[in-house]
Amino acid sequence: MADDAAGILITGGALGCEVDKITRRARTVHSVNNPVLLRAYFERITPATLKRLQAKLQAAKMLANGSMPEHRLLKDSGWATMWQARFAPLRIGQGFLIVPPWQRERDPDRIGLVIRPGQAFGTGHHPSTSGTLSALEELCKNRHIAHGLDVGTGSGILAIAMAKLGVAEVTAIDSDMAAVANAKENAGLNRVRARIHFSTTPLGSLRGRFGLIAANILSSTLIRMAPDLKERLRHQGYLVLAGTLQREAESVAAAYLPELTHIGARNHGAWTTLIFRK
């Protein structure tokens, strides 16, 4: 009955439930063949709610004879935010400093990228993201780029980097609405929201051409998207592809040749960032 009882408690507002074996002494007291102890965790619960839930469990004959719920207050020791310690400030390339919003570290010699980790990919820690950021930094140096495109924006980190590197207008697309929401929040934290257009528009439905395109996606998707990415890149524009393992780089590059010129590659552990020009 534990699962059914947990269902009643969760419907009543419990965050979750935990089942534990009951002591030998309690078995004797409650006269139940296989009793279990069920712990339900609430963010908060009133005496009236506790009484109502107890009545429901009793009516369903789920409580052992003589059993009464015990109400204990638990102090949060910080476990809910301990994961934040993993996201320390991160320096990438010659000029980026990635910080989560709860960190105050700043470096006047680096461009700060404030990224709140969410469900979307892209905190800068993965080699494919750091490799793309380094490539963007190099390509934007001493160049005026009017329009940039970030395909599969995830957290929005690449689109935000383009905007902070001086790209006048940036378009960022992703098929995942949760990713777009996370990216918009991060763009707001970096005060570049007005310069980035986020959407779930498919790549094949975009109009116009871009002087700089970044796509940090799986290699199979990069190969499938090759015709559309080549079409969206303007003459003399730059394309940065990441999310590719070194052993996959040749097959990915082949999908973009000979229409584009392969001008560089950056290896980061097992991962490769490919750079092309049209």
Image (tube, rainbow, N blue to C red):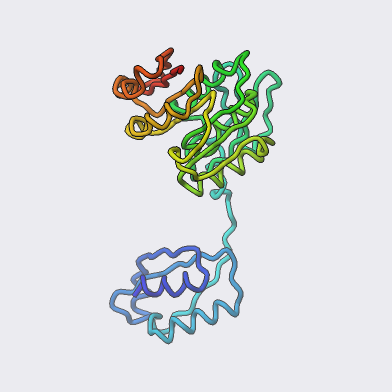
Horizontal side of residue 168 vs 86, given as left or right: right
Outermost residue toward the right in this view: 108
- With respect to residue 37, does 104 lie above or below? above
Q: Please report the residue visible at 56 percent of the width from the left and 32 percent of the height from the top.
A: 159
At which x and y percent is residue 266? 43, 16
Outermost residue toward the bottom in this view: 59
Q: Please report the residue visible at 61 percent of the width from the left and 40 percent of the height from the top.
A: 186
At which x and y percent is residue 77? 58, 51
Horizontal side of residue 29 vs 234, given as left or right: left
- With respect to residue 275, does 157 lie above or below? below
- With respect to residue 149, does 186 lie above or below? below
33 or 99, which is in the foreground?
Answer: 99
For the C terminus, give its image quadrant. top left
At which x and y percent is residue 38? 42, 69
244 or 66, which is in the foreground?
Answer: 244
At which x and y percent is residue 34? 29, 74
